[in-house]
Amino acid sequence: MAAKVTFCAFLFVLLSTSVVAIRPARSSPMARRAALENGLGRTPQMGWNSWNHFHRKINEDIIRQIADAMVDTGLAKLGYEYINIDDFWAAYDRDSQGNLAANVSTFPSGVRALADYVHGKGLKLGIYSDAGTRTCGKLMPGSLGYEDQDAKTFASWGVDYLKYDNCNNQGISPQPRYDAMSKALLNSGRNIFFSLCEWGVNDPATWAGGIGNSWRTTGDIKDTWAKMTAIADKNNKWASYAGPGGWNDPDMLEVGNGGMTTEEYRSHFSIWALMKAPLLIGCDIRSMSNETKEILSNRNVIAVNQDGLGVQGHKVQQDGDQEVWAGPLTGGRFAVVLWNRGSAQASITASWSSIGLNASTVADAHDLWIDDIISAVQGELEETVDSHACKMYVLTPK
């Protein structure tokens, strides 16, 4: 008996240090099909948001210049369409009719004029509010109790997108607070993309599908390798709840803000794209480096994110710090990321069985970052990957 116990213990240790195939938590089929009936978000939203780089230091001139840069850099042609203003755009108090109003010091022309300018560029304007009495910065009113009025105000201004935060919420359960704004937006007379920013506290992936077009699954991102990777893991848990019309949101991109290396940013962008996360740029695109532009402009990686099948890729294999993430695409193809989260160069092997292919399948592997084809790969894909770097492929069975 003792020998048997010893052998079992040895087997457990052996298995715990070997390559492990991973599957995320699964929803019921009905949970994944539930979607907000506004026709928006059939693929993950793409655009820009002011918060990661500018925080509270925003004004209408910056927003206009960002819209200009979105067009001038070619990003708009790649699908980046939303120009989203975050917290600190409004006056401290509502006006005499109880309406939200722009801060006259920083947005003197008002939101309607700004929306007209953005629309004139072929882009869409997003704005921010909060499902509480004040926003997170506490310098502008929230929309709790004013949902219908504020939704109609946003619609009258020509707003196309609402990010809706979760601060100062008076201890009220999030679902009815977010549902109230969802209904108000649907009745506003304008189609407005609804982005829930509940931080994942009450597992919105399980209930937000019929309320919003995307929902935050995590707390705020920071421009560090440690925070970015931790957030990727948290978002991975909810992969099966995402789909056309409603997406898991691990927060905005930090690419180009200076806290990570180029390889780390490339990993960040690759994993967000594979996870069908919103691709919302968070840097100052007016002055971004060539390396930043190269990452944000990779058409092949963007195509994975915007693939019409709408299935979130997830972590399928792990061997210590070496990971394989994968997900299906249209046409029987698969997107695969070999991700080295370790401190040294390493060899990573993606097995067909982990990805979802038969071992006998022969496929061409398109390297999305160097735009090269590895022909006739069978059974597995093995590559050497630098520290904190990744390699991303689309496998096309022959």
Image (cartoon, rainbow, N blue to C red):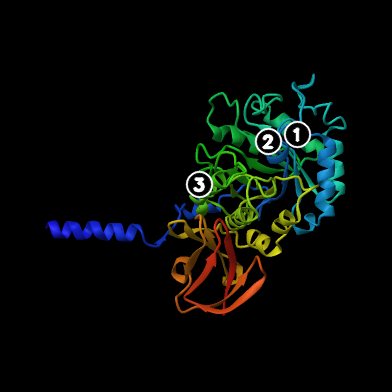
Foreground mark, 3 or 1, reads 3
Q: Kindly identify the amino acid type of the residue bearing the numbered disc 3.
A: Lys
> Mark 2 and mark 3: span between their CA atoms?
30 Å
Q: Kindly identify the amino acid type of the residue bearing the numbered disc 1.
A: Lys
Q: Earlier in the sequence, mark 2 or mark 3?
A: 2
Taking the spot 50% from the left edge, 46% from the top edge, the residue there is: 234
In this view, 279 is above or below 345: above
User: In what quadrant of the picture does the N terminus appear?
Assistant: bottom left
Crowding at dot 2, Cα within 10 Å, few <14 / some 14-19 / many 20+, comes out as: some
Residue marked by disc 2: 184
Residue marked by disc 1: 152
- Res. 136 mark: none
Q: Are marks 1 and 2 in contact (CB under 8 Å)?
A: yes
Q: Are marks 2 and 3 in contact (CB under 8 Å)?
A: no
> Mark 3 and mark 1: span between their CA atoms?
35 Å
Foreground mark, 2 or 3, reads 3
Q: Kindly identify the amino acid type of the residue bearing the numbered disc 2.
A: Ala
Task: Residue 364: name its quadrant.
Answer: bottom right
Residue 195, position in %: x, y? 65, 42
Q: Earlier in the sequence, mark 3 or mark 1?
A: 1
Q: Secondary structure at mark 3?
A: helix
> Mark 1 and mark 2: span between their CA atoms?
8 Å
Task: Residue 153: name its quadrant.
Answer: top right
266 or 78, nearer to the observer: 266
Task: Residue 43: name its quadrant.
Answer: bottom right
Residue marked by disc 3: 234
131 or 319, nearer to the observer: 319
Q: Secondary structure at mark 2?
A: helix
Q: Can residue 373 be seen here?
A: yes
